[in-house]
Amino acid sequence: MGKPARDRVPEVHTTGEDQIATAFAARQGRAALMPYLMGGFPDVPQSLSIGLACADNGADLVELGVPYSDPLADGPVIHAAGTAALRAGVRMGDVLGVGEELSRRLPVVLMCYVNLVLARTPDGFARDLAKAGVSGLIVPDLPLEEATEIRAACDEHGVALVPLVAPTTPDDRLRAIGEQARGFVYTVSVVGTTGERAGGDGGYREILDRVRAHARVPVAIGFGISAPDQACAAADAGADGVIVGTRLVRAAAESDAPATAVGDLVAQLSAGLIR
Amino acid sequence: MSLVEAGVEHRFGPYGGQYVPETLMPALAELETAWVAAREDPGYRAELGGLLRDYAGRPTPLYLAGRLSEVAGREIWLKREDLMHTGSHKINNALGQALLAKRMGKQRIIAETGAGQHGVATATACALLNLECVVYMGAEDIRRQAPNVQRMRLLGAEVVSVQAGARTLKEAVSEAIRDWVTTVATSHYIIGSAVGPAPYPALVRDLQRVIGDEARASLLERAERLPDRVIACVGGGSNSIGIFTAFVGDPDVRLIGVEAAGEGLDSGRHGAPLTAGGRAGVLHGSLSAIMQDEDGQVTEAHSVSAGLDYPGSGPEHAHLRDSGRASYVAVSDEDALAAYREVARLEGIIPALETAHALHYAMHEDGGGSTLDLICLSGRGDKDLAEVMSHDG
């Protein structure tokens, strides 16, 4: 893998939240594109290549998944990719290494289950993320009630702790979550785990409107969005950002040239978002 | 029937909590509200009490096991949960939660099972109450607990084979939670042990504490004393928390949880996170004693008994351990298999392999001056015959 063609100029004193805000704002009216990739899958160098291919093909940020033994929020495709990475011996340090390389190109938001955070202690984990240049952290099994200590540690080290909301989240919870949101609000578009779903554009606007009413940061949407027309529908429904995961992880799993395959899909998604 | 008077705890000391996807948080709040209302409701209590008595066989006998007592050198009293309908204590919780699901208007039930006992109990409750039932079970457990799989299917449940990881209880729970994340509007998840996000550890304990309440009253009446020790096996910890709870306020009664040492604590192939100690972690929605590596990846448990083959433990147990109120020990596969046979010959009772861990401890480990042990005989062992025979010789 060659060096990145151009390095993002590091702004020494910006926080992760600033970097994320800049990435969203740069899109000027169209939704930011945030591909998900599983760190260390199919292997560590190829996952870096996949991330760089995302950056080269129109991604504004990347969501970098950490393989985990018990991923409760993930469907079979991402679960299987994480399991394969763990079996191949991928460790947290390897994924942070990928994050460090990618963060030279675009903001990286780590998606990581809570036990991996607690294992390094919240403070230690946030410090390691900051050291690697990672801008944000998404913890899919960390609801508002459990987030206080980890959010404080992230704040301390300039890492944005991005909360998730779901269609089942009532308005009073949306308000409380929105008040504590850093970076953006990750809106789960469906009641379910990660995975590709046909159609699904009917419900984006309702949930996005509800979330936006309570959020003071950008609102991104993910889970179940895989095709360019779905990404476009989410953008039309008012999403500030669109997250596509399972479709890309499946491409990485099925292709002999994972970075090329994922890069092509990201290019299609990016083109679809331009109106 | 006696239910706990306290509120629904979210934390036991530092342990417990609700580490689940946001999608489930409203459902957990709904469940807690429903439980607080139900357990105070005379109608619910009468209905559950009636089913436990007339349908499931409560109260269960308390039996002074004479020949076991001779071997142990002290009185051994057995609380006979193995005589409950479906063959274990699991029906106490399954009936209570299935009735609760009906109150909440949920027509579809999800459950996980390891040994199959909780799956059979839940399938039974669902047949009785006309609820749809889906049971997740690891492929390895389906292999070693075949009779219970046939039972669940006969009772009308769908049994889903889980192929991930070590294909045992941990993966079955994870898959059940994923189902619930997807179907939460119409489904209730009946978790089988005192684990999971709040309010489950408290809810399951409330429904299982009938074991200890009955045993305590019965022992006071017949032996005219309290036990020196209360001993129960611990996987997730539902039969043990069920029998411990009545005695927590009796400072002279020692509470001992017996985990699975598997091939030995030093081998790493065990199911004894409370005994082994180490850093606490999050598994299946709560912070407790778990088996994990340095990065925080949850490691695979091992036990000859499917019900103890679990790398986590109930958060209340972790707190009882830290506070010194209960102690936790571990018994190996080999010793549990021997106790299974020994108790069959001595008492004409074939215990579940899970329970055999506790029985070995009472019979063959130092009694610490105890003159009377109370043991929760949590289940019957017919389901384990094929597995035990495969270890023969």
Image: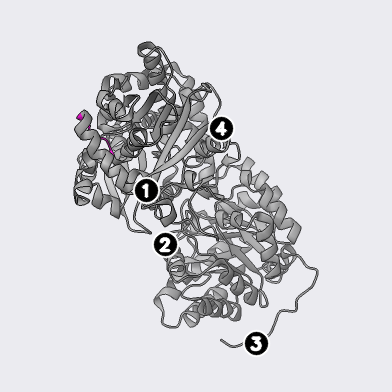
C-beta proximity under 8 Å, tags 1 and 3: no
Q: Residue at x 34, y 39 (%)?
A: B357
Labels 1 and 3 in the same subunit: no
Q: Residues within 10 Å of mark 4 (few under 14, many from 20)?
A: some
Q: Point out residue A21 in the picture as x, y percentages from the top left corner.
A: 72, 65
Q: How far is disc 3 from disc 4 in space, using C-alphas? A: 55 Å
Residue A232 is at least partly visible in this image: no
State the residue position of label 3. Answer: A5
Q: How far is disc 3 from disc 2 in space, using C-alphas? A: 36 Å
Q: Point out residue B318 in the picture as x, y percentages from the top left corner.
A: 52, 40
**Taking A239 as reference, is B249 above or below it?**
above
State the residue position of label 1. Answer: B309
State the residue position of label 2. Answer: A198
Q: What label does residue B9 carry, if any?
A: 4
Which one is in front, B221 or A214? Answer: B221
The disc labelled 3 sits on which kind of residue? Answer: Ala
Q: Using residue A21 as the reference point, say whether residue B191 is left or right of it.
A: left
